[in-house]
Image: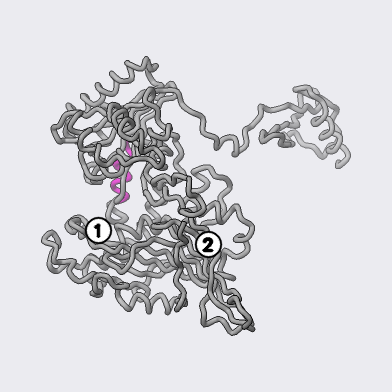
C-alpha cells in the first residue's frame, strides 16, 4: 500500500499531463476520491484519485486554489465610487467623517476622478454652505502644510449637498438622481458603480433611513458594483433593543453589506494587538493563566460631559465606553489565534471569547458619579447614571480561567489615557528580595503618546547590587518620527471601501456583548445599583482601587513611566 502511494505521488509530481491513468494497484483503495495536495508559490495544486468505469484509476488535476495569503490581497475595483454622508450637517460628520475622507483623498487612497461625495441632511443649505461648515475641520496632513489650501479647495469641489427628510420618498429620490447623474458623467456601466452610505445619525433613525436607501438608492450589483451601509454606535441600549435594531436593518441588507463601526478598532495600537500576540514567539508561551496575574483595560478622561450631559445621561459610561470600545479590546487581548486573517475567521474567535465571559457579579462592580454632574441643566437632579465604572470580567476557558480582566472607564478624572496593562505573576524564589518594587508588566498605551513598554526589574548602575524598576520602551513618537499615524476613522472608512469587515462588529458579536452587560444595566436603570460620588480631578471612588487590589492587581509605588522626548 505504501509503495503504491509513493509511486502515485511520484507520477503526480513529475509528469506534466493534466490527466493520468493506471491499473488498480490494491483492493484497499475504494471508489471514493482521494486527494493529494502540494503547494508551490502560495498556490495549492490538488489531484483526485478517481476510479473509472473500466476499473482503472485516474488522477485528475484540479484547478489551482489560491492560498489565504493571496486571497487577502486587495484588488482595486474599477467602478466609480459615491460616498454618501447622511447627517452631513451634524457634529460627527464635520469633526470625524469629512476630515477622514479629506486625509484619504490627500494621501491618494481616493482619487478625484473616481469618487464623489454627497452630503444629505434635513437642513436647507447649499453646496457652498456645507463646504464652508466643513473647511475649518480639515487640518493639514503632516508635511503637506504648503499645499494645504489648494488640497482643501480641490477636495471640497468633490462635495455636493442634497436636502431632504429621513423618512420620506422625495428626498431620497433626489439623492438617487444626483448620484446617478454623477455615475452617468463618468460613463459608468450600470451595475458596476459603488455606493457607500455613512449614517452619521442617531440610531433611532437608522430603520427609516435604511428603508429609504433600500427602496430608492440601491445600486444594481449584477456587474460587480455594490451598496454598503456604515452605522455608528450605540447599537441599541440593551440586548432587546439591539436585536430589534439588527432585525430591522437585517431585513433590508445582508450582513456583508452592513459595517457596524467602532472607531477603537481602527486605532493603531489596537490593530497591533494581533500582530504582537501571533507574530512574536516571545508572547506565545507567556500569554495565559500560568504566567499572567491580571489584565487591566483602562479608559480615563480628564473632563466631564462638556455640554453632552443630556445625551450621556441616556447611556452612561458602561453603554458609552465599556460595552463597545473596551470590550472589543478585551476580545483582541483574549482571543485564540484565528485560522487565518479572513474577517470571518477573526470575528469567529472574538465571538467565542464573548460567549465565555461569566455573568458579572455585583460584588465585583464599583460605579461612580462625579460631583457636579447633575448641575448640568440637561441632567435630572436624581440621575443614577454612572460616569465611572470599574468591574471584573472573568473568562471561563482553558487559557484564562482564574485571570481577572479589570475594566475601568471614567470621566472627570485626574488624567487622560487609554491603555492595556498586562501584569505578570511574582517571580518564584525571589533571591533579590525585590518583589516589593513591583511586578513585570507589559503596557500598551493606546492614547495619547502611543507606545508599548515592558516594565522590568534591573540592576541599578553602580557598585552596589541594588535593583530598580525600568522599562524596555517602544514609543511611536520617537521610533516612527516621519510616519503619519492615521486616525481611526480614516482606516475604517478605507476598509469599508475595500470590503474588509475584519475591524467591524458582526451581528452575533454584538448580541454576545449585550448579553454580558444587559442584566447589570437593567439593575442600574432600576436603581438597584447606586454610583458612589467622587471629586472631579480625582482617581475616582476609592472603592474602585480596593476592588482592583482584591482582584489581584499589585500597584507599583515609586515608578512612573515618562514618554521619551525627541
- Whether residue 442 sits left or right of residue 547 in the image: it is right
Tell me the tag on residue 107. none
Residue 410 in the image, given as x and y percentages of width and height? 31, 65
Tell me the tag on residue 473. 2
Q: Visible in this render: residue 430? A: no
Q: Which residue is mark 1?
A: 315
Question: Mark 2: which secondary structure?
Answer: strand
Q: How is the image coloured?
A: one colour
- Inter-mark Cα distance, 2 to 1: 37 Å
| Residue 316 vs residue 76, the one in the foreground | 76
> What residue is shown at x 22% (from left), y 60% (from top)?
305
At label 2, counting other C-alpha atoms closer than 10 Å, the crowd grade (few under 14, some 14-19, many 20 or more) is: some
From the viewer's perspective, is residue 100 above or below residue 421?
Answer: above
Q: Main secondary structure of the magenta part?
A: helix
Q: Is residue 82 magenta?
A: no
Figure quadrant of residue 215: top left
Question: Mark 1: which secondary structure?
Answer: loop
Residue 297 in the image, given as x and y percentages of width and height? 42, 64
Stretch in magenta: 242-252
Amino acid at each position: 500500500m505504501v509503495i503504491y502511494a509513493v509511486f502515485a505521488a511520484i507520477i503526480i509530481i513529475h509528469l506534466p499531463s493534466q490527466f493520468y491513468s493506471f491499473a488498480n494497484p490494491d483492493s484497499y483503495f475504494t471508489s471514493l476520491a482521494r486527494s493529494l495536495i502540494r503547494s508551490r508559490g502560495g498556490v495549492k495544486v490538488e489531484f483526485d484519485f478517481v476510479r473509472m468505469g473500466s476499473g482503472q484509476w485516474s488522477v485528475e488535476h484540479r484547478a489551482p486554489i489560491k492560498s489565504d495569503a493571496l486571497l487577502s490581497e486587495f484588488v482595486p475595483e474599477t467602478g466609480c465610487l459615491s460616498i454618501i454622508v447622511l447627517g452631513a450637517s451634524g457634529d460627527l460628520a464635520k469633526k470625524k467623517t469629512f476630515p477622514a475622507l479629506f486625509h484619504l483623498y490627500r494621501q491618494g487612497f481616493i482619487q478625484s476622478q473616481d469618487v464623489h461625495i454627497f452630503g444629505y441632511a434635513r437642513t436647507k443649505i447649499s453646496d457652498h454652505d456645507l463646504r464652508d461648515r466643513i473647511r475649518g475641520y480639515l487640518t493639514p496632513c503632516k508635511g503637506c502644510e504648503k499645499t494645504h489650501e489648494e488640497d482643501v479647495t480641490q477636495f471640497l469641489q468633490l462635495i455636493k449637498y442634497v436636502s431632504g427628510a429621513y423618512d420620506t420618498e422625495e428626498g431620497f429620490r433626489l439623492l438617487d438622481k444626483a448620484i446617478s447623474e454623477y455615475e452617468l458623467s463618468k460613463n459608468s456601466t450600470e451595475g458596476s458603480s459603488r455606493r457607500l452610505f455613512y449614517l452619521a445619525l442617531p440610531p433611532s433613525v437608522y430603520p427609516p433611513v435604511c428603508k429609504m436607501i433600500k427602496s430608492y438608492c440601491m445600486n444594481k450589483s449584477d456587474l460587480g458594483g455594490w451598496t454598503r451601509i456604515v452605522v455608528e454606535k450605540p447599537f441599541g441600549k440593551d440586548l432587546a433593543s439591539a436585536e430589534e435594531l439588527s432585525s430591522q436593518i437585517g431585513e433590508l441588507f445582508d450582513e456583508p453589506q452592513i459595517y457596524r463601526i467602532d472607531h477603537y478598532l481602527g486605532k493603531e495600537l489596537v490593530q497591533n494587538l494581533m500582530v504582537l500576540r501571533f507574530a512574536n514567539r516571545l508572547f506565545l508561551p507567556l500569554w495565559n493563566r500560568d504566567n499572567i496575574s491580571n489584565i487591566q483595560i483602562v479608559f480615563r478622561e480628564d473632563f466631564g460631559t462638556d455640554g453632552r450631559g443630556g445625551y450621556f445621561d441616556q447611556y452612561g459610561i458602561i453603554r458609552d465606553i465599556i460595552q463597545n470600545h473596551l470590550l472589543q479590546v478585551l476580545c483582541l487581548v483574549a482571543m485564540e489565534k484565528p485560522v487565518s486573517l479572513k474577517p470571518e475567521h477573526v470575528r469567529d474567535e472574538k465571538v467565542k471569547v464573548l460567549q465565555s465571559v461569566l455573568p458579572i457579579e455585583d460584588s465585583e462592580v464599583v460605579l461612580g458619579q462625579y460631583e457636579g454632574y447633575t448641575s448640568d441643566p440637561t441632567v435630572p437632579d436624581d440621575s443614577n447614571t454612572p460616569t465611572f465604572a470599574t468591574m471584573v470580567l472573568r473568562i471561563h476557558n482553558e487559557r484564562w480561567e482564574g485571570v481577572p480582566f479589570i475594566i475601568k472607564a471614567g470621566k472627570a478624572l485626574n488624567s487622560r489615557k487609554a491603555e492595556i496593562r498586562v501584569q505578570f505573576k511574582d517571580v518564584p524564589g525571589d533571591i533579590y528580595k525585590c518583589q516589593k518594587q513591583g511586578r513585570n508588566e507589559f503596557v500598551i498605551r493606546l492614547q495619547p503618546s502611543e507606545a508599548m513598554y515592558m516594565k522590568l526589574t534591573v540592576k541599578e548602575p553602580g557598585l552596589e547590587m541594588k535593583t530598580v524598576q525600568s522599562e524596555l520602551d517602544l514609543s511611536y513618537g520617537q521610533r516612527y518620527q516621519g510616519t503619519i499615524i492615521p486616525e481611526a476613522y480614516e482606516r475604517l472608512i478605507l476598509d469599508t471601501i475595500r470590503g474588509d469587515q475584519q475591524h467591524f462588529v458582526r451581528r452575533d458579536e454584538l448580541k454576545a456583548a449585550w448579553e454580558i452587560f444587559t442584566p447589570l444595566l437593567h439593575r442600574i436603570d432600576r436603581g438597584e445599583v447606586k454610583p458612589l460620588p467622587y471629586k472631579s480631578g480625582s482617581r475616582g471612588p476609592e472603592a474602585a482601587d480596593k476592588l482592583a487590589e482584591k482582584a489581584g492587581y499589585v500597584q507599583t509605588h515609586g515608578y512612573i513611566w515618562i514618554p521619551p522626548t525627541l
